[in-house]
Image: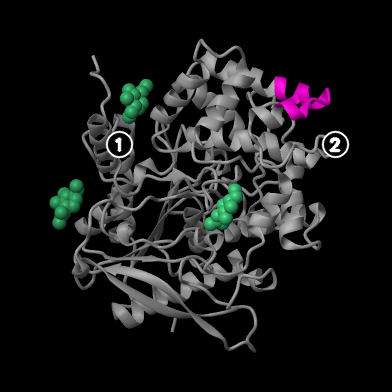
Amino acid sequence: MLGPVTPFHLIEMFVRLTIVLGVTVAFATAAIEINSSRPLLFGTHRIVPPTLVRQYESDEFEWNEFEVRQTHSNAQNRNFFPIRYVSNEQYYQPGGPLFLFIGGPWELQPDVVLEGHFVDIAKNMSAYLVANELRYYGQSIPFDDASRANLRLLAITQILPDIASLITHLKYDVLRDPEARVILAGVGFSASIAQWARKRYQHLVQGVWSSSGMVGASTEYEDFSEAVGANIRRFGSDECYNTIFQGFGVAENLIDAGLSSTLDRMFNVCSPIKSEDSVDVEAFLNGIFNEIASQAVSVNLRETIDQMCQVLTDPDQPNGLTALSEWLTGRFPDADCLVMDFESIIEAYQVTDWEDEMLRNGERQWLYQRCTALGWPLTSRSPDQPFGRRITPNLFMQICERVFDEWLTPDVFRSLVRDTNIFFGGRRPDVQRIYHMHGSLDPWRYTGVRNAYGDSYIRLIMNATHGEDLASISEDDSYALRSAKESVAREIRRWVYQNPGPPPPF
Ligand SMILES: *[C@@H]1O[C@H](CO)[C@@H](O)[C@H](O)[C@H]1NC(C)=O
Ligand SMILES: *[C@@H]1O[C@H](CO)[C@@H](O)[C@H](O)[C@H]1NC(C)=O
Ligand SMILES: *[C@@H]1O[C@H](CO)[C@@H](O)[C@H](O)[C@H]1NC(C)=O
């Protein structure tokens, strides 16, 4: 039996959770609360690795910078800018491999070279550990401001040569060992970069551990809401799922009946829903969906879904719609009102000053990458999910076009997404020596590879969340999780020891 939940218990529980879940496990961004009196109920669902609680000694790691070319595709442009990386040489022995954890759409934190399973493997193999920051994120910034024009070099085709140059620099100038073997790891989009780096530069990268890698670009990502719905059924209840289903259904009917002002009041929106404008209606419904989804993708999803469902299925709630509005407004006790309209979303993403929170947290940059290469509009058109029927790719495409200018029409968007899959192979990339891991509870897992060939592996870890495999082996691991971690460690050892070092390219 659980005792009464006193604040002390809550604190204790929080501390325990953060320690157990440690470094590597990731969480999703929910509403954007730059101004807590007006939270913006929109987000690009970046999943970022949280930072550690423990303080590190400064001699355990070192910050560095490395100059890369602003553009790798124009010989006449000789501008350079520094990308940051952090290294940990504590475990390195001459002759050992180089382990590089690839940066994703977030600011670089030293945690990834200090703790977690990748670090444990590095320790075992006397590896030199490095993690880099992705161009345009954190402090690795190529231009004075983030105007639309200046975002043009935020492209996979520019990121990959950054990685190749960095690896070469580390091998030749830092380790002074041209034969050093190189292993990459990453999580989510950073795992995609790791995979593509191996595909492109097989002479530089001997193997990749891809945790929840997202490589199949798409112009609509329906599986997301289905997977969120399934998580809600599993860790909440059928009743909770049905409450959401009912709430969305009633909301859509009210809008159709010209009664959207009822919703304005119930959800305390800052700007009334423009019920004649389908994109504004989608933005409102997406606002509710976005907040529920953030509860169902985090690493603590078993707890967060349970807590949400307790409120949603409270027997005092007369119906699904009131349950949704009470839960949603109750999440923002400090808010004057909730921002859920299309125009406010556009305005929030149009900022260009690097000091602005929307750039420091990577939201604008990540939206640009989604709009110009990756896609994944989250929608509610599948019959097998509870979030109504109205959220379509049109909302996402309209946001892209308005935030990043008129050239980015829906047709251009679709062709850019298609190009990404043409250039990198989408979900069937046909590359050897990649270990693909996905948690069965991760709603992003359907963007991962479908088939692995030859010396590559796919492991679906039952009952695991996005990136859960990155944490150190622990007594709390399920059998499936533990065996996946042991298996990737074995493969990395084999890739390093059984494959001859690459010949020096020059
Ligand atoms: C937050 O929004 C309120 C209006 O709801 C406004 O008065 C206040 O100035 C805003 N604060 C900041 C820091 O922008
Ligand atoms: C590395 O791991 C292997 C396999 O678990 C083990 O046999 C070996 O002793 C470890 N080596 C070091 C230096 O920890
Ligand atoms: C799933 O994982 C949770 C937490 O790790 C655990 O409590 C639960 O028993 C697991 N369920 C199954 C079916 O493995």
State which quadrant residue 21 falls in: top left
Q: Residue at the spot x=81%, y=61% of the render? A: 406
- Residue 47 percent location from the top left of the image: 48, 47
Element type at marker 2? loop
Disc 1 crowd, CA 10 A, few/some/many (<14, 14-19, 20+)? some
Locate the N terminus by quadrant. Answer: top left
| Numbered label attached to residue 483 | 1
Q: Residue at the spot x=52%, y=60% of the render? A: 357
State which quadrant residue 102 falls in: bottom left
Residue type, numbered disc 2: Glu
The reply, left or right, for residue 284 in relation to residue 52 is right
Label whose residue precedes the other's in the sequence (1 or 2): 2
Whether residue 160 appears in magenta in the rendering, the answer is no
Q: Residue farthest to the right?
A: 276
Q: Which residues are magenta?
A: 250-262
Residue type, numbered disc 1: Ser
Distance between mark 1 and mark 2 Cα atoms: 54 Å
Q: Residue at the spot x=79%, y=57% of the render? A: 412
- Residue 252 percent location from the top left of the image: 75, 25
Q: Is residue 422 visible?
A: no
Residue position for label 2: 276
Element type at marker 1? helix
Quadrant field for ligand 3: top left
- Residue 16 percent location from the top left of the image: 24, 37
Main secondary-structure element of the magenta-colored stretch: helix
